[in-house]
Amino acid sequence: MTETPLIVTKKRFVAGAVCPACSEPDKLMMWNENDVPHRECVGCGYSDTLNAEGNSVPKELGTRVNKPVVKPADPKVQGVQFFPNPKLKKPVDPN
């Protein structure tokens, strides 16, 4: 088998970027490995991989065990809309 060489770009800091874990500004480093962007915080050690849109790729795939359960709406609860009653107008002060 032939192995493709691992292409890694130089790690660089992103000016003004805020860490999603510790909220520290200017602590994120970014680099690419085989055109896959990665980022890491030098303050807290948080690291993740980004997809093509720039969103974080989850480390664990979603399953029925680790996804939050969406509860259906209670059928007994109904929305109510209030309308002003025109007969209940406040008297106008003649002064």
Image (cartoon, grey):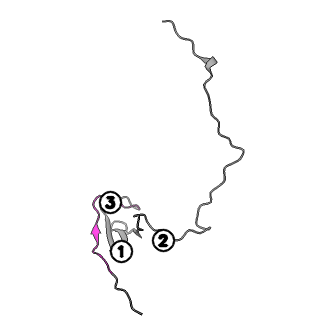
The image position of residue 91, as x and y in percent, is: 57, 12
Q: Is residue 13 part of the magenta span, yes or no?
A: yes
Report the magenta residues as a range: 7-20
Q: Amino acid at mark 1?
A: Asp
Q: Pointer 1: what residue?
A: 35
The image position of residue 4, as x and y in percent, is: 37, 86
Horizontally, is 48 left or right of 64 in the view? left
Q: Pointer 3: what residue?
A: 17
Which quarter of the picture shows residue 76? top right
The image position of residue 88, as x and y in percent, is: 62, 18
Give the CA distance from mark 3 to mark 2.
21 Å
Which quarter of the picture shows residue 26? bottom left
Q: Earlier in the sequence, mark 1 or mark 3?
A: 3
Give the main secondary structure of the magenta stretch. loop
Q: Counting other residues with Cα less than 10 Å from the Cα at mark 1, is it few (<14), some (14-19), or many (20 or more)? A: few
Q: Is residue 69 part of the magenta span, yes or no?
A: no
